[in-house]
Image (tube, helix red, strand yellow):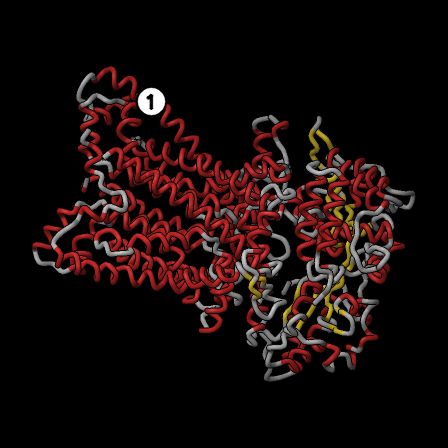
Amino acid sequence: MIEKFHMADMVDKFEAANPGKTVTIVEYPDNQALSNFALQWSQDKSSQDIVVVDGASVAVQFLAKDLIVDFNKTDFFQGPTAKENFVGETLAYDSLGDVQFAIPIGLETYNISANKTYFAEAGLLDADGNIPEPKDWDELYDMAAAMTVRDGNTVTRPGMTIQWGPNAVSTMIAVEQAVRGSFYKDDDKTLTFDTKEMRDVLEVWKKGVDAGVFSIDTFANKDAGRSNFNAGNIPMVLETAAHVPEAAPTIGEENSVVLAMPGSMTNGSYGFTAGVIVPSASKNQDLAIKFIQEGMMSDVQVAVGLEWGKLPVIKDYFDQIDAPWKTAMYDLVKISKPAPMYRDLPEIQVTGKQLLQEYLTGAKDVDTFLTEFEALIEKSNKNAD
Amino acid sequence: MVITAVRPTLPDEPVRTRPDKVGKRRKFSSGVLFILPAFLFIFVFMLYPLVSSGYMSFTEYNFVYDDAPKFIGLDNYFAAFQDPLFTTALRNTFVYGVFFFVTVMASSLVIALLLFQKLRFNAFYRSAVFVPIVVPLSLAGLVFLWILQPNYGLLNHILGDVLNMPFLAQPWLSNADTAMASIIVLGAWASIGFVTILFLAGLQGISQDTLEAAEMDGAAGIKKVFHIILPSLRETYVLTGTWTIIHALKVFVEPMVMTDGGPGTSTLVVYQQVYLTAFTYFDMGYASAMGYILGLIILVLVVLNFFIGKIRADKDA
Amino acid sequence: MLRAAQRREQAPIQESKRRKVKSSFLSKFWFHLVLIVLAVLFLAPLVYILLNSFKSADEIFQVPQSILPKEWTLENYAAAISKGFIDYFRNSVVITVGGVLLTVLLSSLAGYGFAKLPFRGANFVLLTIVATLTVPLVIFLVPMYLMENEVGLLDTNLGLLLPNVAVSLPFAILIMRASFIAIPKEIEESATMDGAGVLRRWWAVMLPMARNGMVLVVIMTSYAIWGEYTIAKALTMDPAAMPLSVGLTLLKGEVWQYGILAAVIVLAMLPPIIIFIIFQKHIVAGVAQGAVKG
């Protein structure tokens, strides 16, 4: 993440502007480290002044014991980082009630990354040479099926990879938001997948898995789709669309396209950001906030967006992005929704992934799958603190 | 037969050395002193955490949300056995454990017997078998993950393109049965070397007299193996058995790296469920209870293994 | 091959020479066959990784792939080494060497105590020690973490070395205990008559005879600590303090670039393999020495 966010540039910028101050960046391997940090914070010690969390919503849990700073209670939102300068609803991604527990950085949203070469090969391009937008999942299935390559009975190249690994529940949320315009029940706060629209999608997914049109290699290796896409080995991948620019160097910029999944242009998708948090135990909070303002919320975000598809959260910098996928992404980001801020969301994600995989491999039928999933949501703690 | 008398090694035979009283008293104190340093280490880093998490297993304690553990008696233990994820994980752990135990014990013993023949190229064979133990398991898991990839992996390439049997190629880790088989293979690949060394050490320990006596009796080949060699390895079985039982049921890194417990829950093991509960859900109380259940099961099996070995040896002596 | 097999067989064969040679040639053929197949299976993943570490990124994903690199490149090694590898490596060496020395010392003391100096409650203590082995390490991590945080051992080599020793000790004690028990009591008794004190007997008489067990403990402990992941991941947050097993995961970046991963794995395996090759003779000698004492 350090490299991806060009943090060294942020540090250089900050240190040049503030002589005598040094910033040390340390990378942590995965989110387990967060629980270590939290343990340390709860003893009122902290080795960090700022932590950047991938998927900011996991940070919400640290509000419970006031382990992290509420930015609304600081003077962060002044000058260039005033609230009105942020893109769309991004600040809402990392806030709960009137508490701003993290500052978003690197906007992303779920959609389809497509490799145009294969669409041309299969004769799927429209008269203008563009990929036509699939209206519904049946159409999307047909496109994927048309690009699936078989050798006898074995599929040698599936048409599409859907992120059904550790982020399976995020995928379901994104897809449901797109096809139905919401992933909540009527109360607008209880997650549900037992809906007519989602059942239709699930049916198509199962059909695709059985036919080998949708690959299931993300079960074991969450990066399978992405690696294959980057290597030019798969026509479509449904996961965070931020990966599109990544593939450009190998498959060609004109061939790496963000394709709207069915419904997403009207209903949006699932959006998320990384989040910058400041532990309450930090002894240098003022300096930390200054660094976020001057170093992180700077024009460095433009380069990050161009290279990694993690879009700037500050409007001025967003406008400086110039890439073929920008408009599509921007329209999408504006209407996308953040994940529910449940205390038990991690458990819903892990168990939900297991249930979905059991359904897709035929171990459970659709009714059992949805009943168990709804029961899981039902018994979860859906408060944030 | 004379043989087993020379093999005094089974534990719990302190009676053998019984000198005069003075000697015994001196031994009492010095024995404690010899053990003390190691014990202190284990006490501070293992026993204290063991007791501390033992207490936590009787409490409700989410270490991110709760200020202090709340005592709830045996509730976590009752909850575990009604939790379908835990029982599934337990069943998977046993499936893995049984296959792992049988594969590792049997292959290691056979390989040790083969290496014991001191054939030509013995050094090469030995190195080949031992080398996997030097590869850190987390990295070995990545290697296997890579080999088993459906489209650019080595295994499917060999099956499809080299052996020309493409119908055998498949997404190994995305199917419940082959995924479990894959992690068993990784576990065995990584462990057989060490267990083989333990068996070889046991074989080398069989006295020349024993082997020669067998030679005189005209016991040849397979017969010699079954009647002389295998029975003389009892204390080695205790050691290898203990090691293998513990490693079989504490399996974690293999499924974590290769399958993340999937597809579905088909390779979810207890250790991983404990890990998730502790470090993703922060539920230390419940995680500790599940860890303790696994620990008790392993302890029972290890003790059982110990006594089976002991009884058999006693009967023999 | 035939001649060689015969020659090697000649010494031990006493009777019915001809028949035996024939049957043993046949069985030797099968033995070799089995061992060759096994050797291939055990080595294939490692050879595959070694070869891939010399391939460029494009070549690795080629379908169908070639086993040998078409163009040999060292770029993966350059990439692996440039990123903090040296720090991780040094930490691993310090933790492993220190940990192994401590484990061997403590386990051969304790193993001797359990084997030859029985005291009341010894079995109970032994059982308690074995019991610590059976519980998943994860549930120890939080208490361990809080303890080390309290005394400032987090993110230090010592902070990893000590718990690693504690975790390695129980099984090491079992091994050492077994090897001391295997030493006939007469040997020690004769030393006692010479008037040697217990510490001297342990050091000068018993320890050399238990070399077999010590070699096993060294092998087991060094590889266990070198590859240890769970503790290291929990108790280090600063890359400067991480050993290879955890630090290497930081080289992953966004997605594992397989070529770099391969280079990293080769580099992580190299030191233990070298140690293994150096000590190979000793391992065999140590193990074989058991035969003499019988």
Residue B192 rendering spot, x and y as whole percentages: 41, 40
On the rendered structure, is C97 left or right of A188?
left
On the rendered structure, is A250 left or right of C6?
right
Q: Which residue is most to the front? A: B73
User: In front here: B175 or A77?
Assistant: B175
On the rendered structure, is C107 left or right of A163?
left
Residue drawn at point x = 82 percent, y = 37 percent: A122
On the rendered structure, is C279 left or right of C205?
right
Q: Up-down: is B111 above or below A198?
A: above
Residue B285 rendering spot, x and y as whole percentages: 56, 60
Residue drawn at point x = 12 percent, y = 51 percent: C189
User: SS class of the residue under badge 1?
Assistant: helix
Q: Up-down: is A249 above or below A77?
A: above
Q: Up-down: is B308 above or below C192?
A: above
Q: Which residue is mark 1?
A: C27
Residue B168 rendering spot, x and y as whole percentages: 61, 28
Residue drawn at point x = 81 percent, y = 62 percent: A322
Whether residue A231 is visible, yes or no, is no
Please identify the quarter of the rendering in which residue B204 is found. top left
Residue B3 rendering spot, x and y as whole percentages: 20, 32
* Chain of the residue under the numbered disc 1 shown in the image: C
Quadrant housing the C terminus of chain C:
top left
User: In front here: A61 or B32?
Assistant: B32
Q: Which residue is most to the left? A: C194
10 Å crowding of disc 1: few (<14), some (14-19), many (20+): few
Query: How many numbered dots are placed on residues in this image?
Result: 1
Identified by mark 1, the residue type is Ser
Quadrant housing the N terminus of chain C:
top left
Whether residue B200 is visible, yes or no, is yes
Please identify the quarter of the rendering in which residue A320 is found. bottom right
User: In front here: C110 or B197?
Assistant: C110
Q: Which residue is most to the right? A: A127
